[in-house]
Image (tube, rainbow, N blue to C red):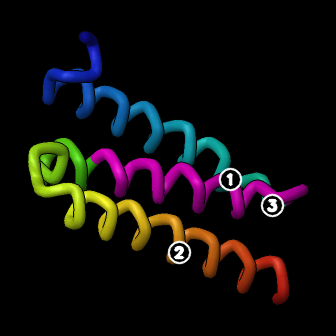
Amino acid sequence: MFLQSNTAIWALLALATVVSWFMGGDATLNIPAVMLLIAFFKTRLVIIHFMEVKHAPLALRLAGEAWGIICCTALIVLYSMA
């Protein structure tokens, strides 16, 4: 599968970085919320693929996933309240 190689994951991370960078100059709508989602997607990829959590026990993987979801949700809610 394409997303199994580290090079493919790195390319996806680079693409997400470029997309975020181009979106950075636009403060309309909910662009910052989308940028946060992209950042946490990138964080998830790094945790799962480069920190080898995909081969870890289920409890550790679920803890990593829960951390990402909770932090991302909290930041988006806090941003929308500001």
Q: Is residue 6 magenta?
A: no
| Residue at image mark 3 | 27
Sequence-wise, which precedes: disc 1 or disc 2? 1
Q: Amino acid at mark 2?
A: Ile
Dot 2 falls on a residue whose secondary structure is helix
Q: Could you tell me the amino acid type at mark 1?
A: Val
- Residue under the point 18% across and 44% down: 54
Q: CA distance from mark 1 to mark 3?
A: 11 Å
Residue 76, percent from left and from top: 69, 72
Name the side, left or right, on which 35 lies relative to 5. right
The label nearer to you, 1 versus 2, is 2
Earlier-in-chain disc, 1 versus 3 = 3
Q: Secondary structure at mark 1?
A: helix
User: As shown in the figure, which amino acid type bears the numbered disc 3?
Assistant: Ala
Q: Which residue is mark 2?
A: 70
Q: Residues within 10 Å of mark 2 (few under 14, many from 20)?
A: few
* Residue tagged 1: 34
